């Protein structure tokens, strides 16, 4: 991935987390790490899956995942 794209993704996540925390006001925030991973993982997988024409082997390779792990995540997020 090109550094410019990585920086853009990092900035987007940073901006979204700051916005989320500000909207929570005085509410206690828990499990933010898991929330962010879940919110990012599903659209990431879906985008790469569409990019590869739903080729699971290619998708797994691009994501750096084992194909079995990818399939578990596809089921988890209702993408299969």
Image: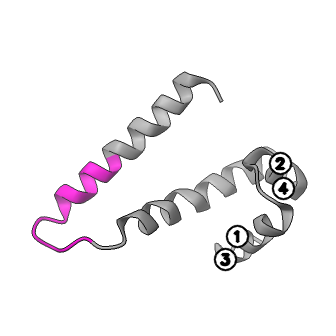
Q: How far apart are marks 3 and 4 (CA)?
A: 16 Å
- SS at mark 4? loop
Q: Give the range drawn in magenta.
A: 16-29
Q: In which quarter of the image is the C terminus?
A: bottom right
Asked whether the beta carbons under mark 1 and mark 3 sit within 8 Å of each other, the answer is yes
Circle 4 Cα neighbour tier, 10 Å, few/some/many (<14 / 14–19 / ≥20): some
Disc nearer the start of the sequence (3/2): 2
Task: Please give the name of the residue rendered at 60% of the width and 62% of the height, measured from the top-left corner.
Answer: 42
Q: Which residue is drawn at 58% across and 59% down?
A: 41
Q: Which mark is residue 76?
A: 3
Q: Distance between the residues labelled 3 and 2?
A: 19 Å
The local crowd at label 3, few if under 14, some if 14 to 19, many if 20 or more residues have their Cα within 10 Å, is few
Q: Residue at x 83, y 48 (%)?
A: 61
Query: In this image, 37 relative to 15: left or right?
Result: right
Q: Where is residue 68 in the image (x, y as percent from the top left)?
A: 84, 69
Lower sequence index among marks 2 and 1? 2
**Sequence-wise, which precedes: disc 3 or disc 4?**
4
Query: Residue 56 placed where, x, y %?
Result: 86, 58
- How far is disc 4 from disc 2 in space, using C-alphas? 13 Å
> Based on the displayed image, in which of its 4 quarters is residue 33 positioned?
bottom left
Please name whichever residue, 3 or 8, is drawn nearer the observer in this view of the structure.
3
Q: In which quarter of the image is residue 10?
A: top left
Residue sitting farthest toward the left: 26
Q: Are marks 3 and 4 in contact (CB under 8 Å)?
A: no
- Disc 4 target residue: 54
Magenta span contains residue 22? yes
Mark 4 and mark 2 lie on one chain; the one further toward the N terminus is: 4
Q: Nearer the viewer, mark 4 or mark 2?
A: 2
Residue 75 magenta-drawn?
no
Residue linked to disc 2? 61
Tell me where residue 76 appears, x and y as whole percent: 66, 76
């Amino acid at each position: 991935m090109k550094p410019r794209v990585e920086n853009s993704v990092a900035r987007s996540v940073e901006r979204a987390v700051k916005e989320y925390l500000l909207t929570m006001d005085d509410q206690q925030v828990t499990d933010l790490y898991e929330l962010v991973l879940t919110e990012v993982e599903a659209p990431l997988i879906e985008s790469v899956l569409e990019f590869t024409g739903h080729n699971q082997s290619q998708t797994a390779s691009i994501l750096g995942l084992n194909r079995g792990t990818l399939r578990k995540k596809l089921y988890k997020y209702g993408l299969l």
